[in-house]
Image (tube, grey):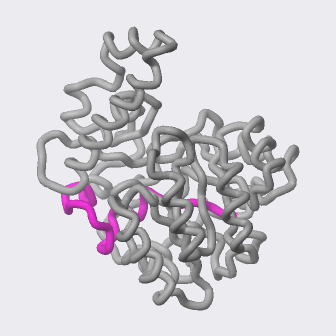
Amino acid sequence: MQTKLTQLLNINHPIIQAPMFLVSNTSMVTEAMKSGIAGCIPALNYRTLSELRDAIKELKKAKVEGGSFGFNLIVNKSNVKYKEQLRVLCEEGCDFIITSLGSPEETIREAHAVGIKVFCDVTDLHFAKKVERLGADAVIAVNNEAGGHRGNLSPKEIISLLKENVSIPIISAGGVGCKADIEEILGYGAEGVSVGSPFIASEEAGVTQEYKQACVDYGSKDIVVTERISGTPCTVINTPYVKKIGTKSPWLERTLNKNRKLKKWVKMLRFYIGMKATEKAALKATYKTVWVAGPSIEHTNAILPVKDIVNKLVI
């Protein structure tokens, strides 16, 4: 399956192992590269810049022909580490950066100066055209089947819309759990796919066995959208704990969000509280199980090595 994405990243298959908060790590990306696809890690998975720098060096040593690696940057004000993370990525080097939740203008300028490609998350045509004007190398079309923060349009709707109106490659994010899904997405006009949730249940993922097994035991019908993680709709597995606390923001929080002066601070507090809850559920045993995942876990039937998950996607 040779496409513009395989040419851009010099990979064998048009697949990016999606960056997942707390889940993605160097072991996963190393195995992804060995399997002929690209792998990506959120820069926020590293608490310090030295840890981020070490991860880049490790992946540079592990890189093989037919594989590629990158990092995801949150480029809005909620990420106070953004500018320093960008600096480290540009100093050490990687193949690509995926931007999320803000303007990618500075990232595109700084990354292109050192030969790093930039792909930008978008959920609609307005932002797709904007990042194209800024010089993005591709757009990542986040659809309504994505895990975590998702878009509002179906895969076919957003790909068709972007295909008609932008000229840079389209990478589809969301709803891919098997080879047939990839073929369908490419048939709509995408040049590749970003796949996340199926890799949660990988042997290399650094999350609890309970989280991995949940991705095996639950299916697409068990995915619900909650506002209680970041204040923005986010998909999670509908565990008994999620059912107990509900999926809507508390009344006081909704009220404060209507205040223009307080809205920013309320969102930052919600994001901090939600991320801490997600971290506890992902990394240690707890009854407060808030596990982020998308409907593509429908195709996850066992905890497998990354290489076997890739094989299920391409063979």
In which quadrant of the rendered view does residue 87 lie?
Answer: bottom right
Q: Is residue 203 magenta?
A: yes
Please determine whether, in this image, residue 49 is positioned above or below residue 55. Answer: above
What is the x, y in percent for residue 53?
Answer: 43, 73
Please determine whether, in this image, residue 59 is positioned above or below residue 114. Answer: below
In which quadrant of the rendered view does residue 29 lie?
Answer: bottom left
Q: Which residue is at the front of the view, 182 or 75?
A: 75
Left or right: 71 with respect to 203?
A: right
Q: Which residue is at the front of the view, 88 or 213?
A: 88
Which residue is at a point 31% across and 49% down the rendered structure image? 218
Left or right: 216 with respect to 208?
A: right
What is the x, y in percent for residue 52?
Answer: 41, 68
Which residue is at a point 21% across and 60% down the rendered structure image? 208
What is the x, y in percent for residue 110?
Answer: 68, 62
Please determine whether, in this image, residue 7 is positioned above or below residue 184. Answer: below
- Magenta-colored span: 192-213
